[in-house]
Amino acid sequence: MATSCTLHFVFKVGDRAKTATFYRDVLGMKILRHEEFEEGCKATCNGPYDGKWSKTMVGFGREDDHFVAELTYNYGVGEYHLGNDFLGLTLQSSKAVSNALYLTQAPGGYPFYIVDKEQPASDPVQKVCLGVSDLQRSSHYWTTLLGMKVIEKNKEKKTVLMGFADSQCKLELQDISGTVDHGTAFGRIAFSCPREQLSDLEALMKKENQNILTPLVSLDTPGKATVEVVILADPDGHEICFVGDEAFRQLSMVDPKGDELLDKAMDEDKSDEWFAKHNRQKAAA
């Protein structure tokens, strides 16, 4: 998997408007594309929900050379329970610091760490940190089976920093000395690899008796490319998506109408008004 590329992390969001404001106005990210779906994803991209949902990709640049966020919104779900699985995303941007704090939270409670330095010309997103219950076991999974290389170990903080390439966003694993709780907000980290490697990866995981959440499957996006994915789970249940690179490059092209499509969808979403009118609250997952 040496030719793999780190792509994005999936966040479930309950308040799409506040979330859009945070990513656009506080962090300074751009809407790369926005898509609406009438039914749940075959690979549970939107979680265990069958109804209408949307996907919004936001970042400092396209996924070819930037790590971005996938914001998943399930209509009718107003909030999700956070666990201790996602420990934070670190990015470098003095502009974002001036808009927020060094440690801030996205709507929903997701932690973000902002380094007070000038935003680099390359990707400002430095690393994503995930909690694990056994650092040695998890490090073996991510390096030996998935092919990441260890960049730095910190015994005091009980962390291991790793990645597929120095120029890409890194993955940091931190031992939390206990069971990993994914709550209902559990996310998913995504990587791309050459399409022909997907079946080999699935075969390797079967051989090693590892958890495969979704065997190799094709996913359609109306009017866009069809991609093939394999969804895995590491020893602590962190969801991992590997997608065929060739088709994904077509799917992930920046849509110049992304902002317009998101704003239109939010304007047409009258669910908050409906629940308020009927003196009810949206479901809490």
Image (cartoon, rainbow, N blue to C red):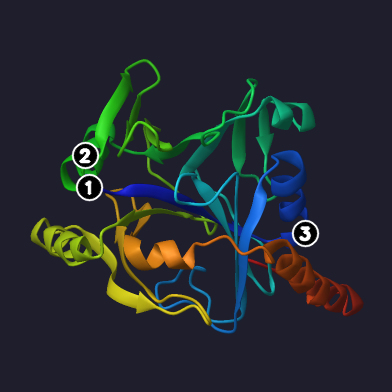
CB atoms of marks 3 and 2 within 8 Å = no
Residue with the mark numbered 3: 17
* Disc 1 element: loop
Quadrant in the rendering for residue 179:
top left
N-term mark: 3 or 2: 3
Identify which residue is drawn at 67% across, 39% down. Answer: 105
* Disc 3 element: helix
Q: Residues within 10 Å of mark 2 (few under 14, many from 20)?
A: some
3D distance between C-alphas at marks 3 and 2: 38 Å
Residue with the mark numbered 1: 146
3D distance between C-alphas at marks 1 and 2: 6 Å
* Disc 2 element: helix
Which amino acid type is shown beneath numbered disc 3?
Ala
Q: On the rendered image, what quadrant is the C terminus found in?
A: bottom right
Identify which residue is drawn at 43% across, 38% down. Answer: 169
Q: Residues within 10 Å of mark 1 (few under 14, many from 20)?
A: some
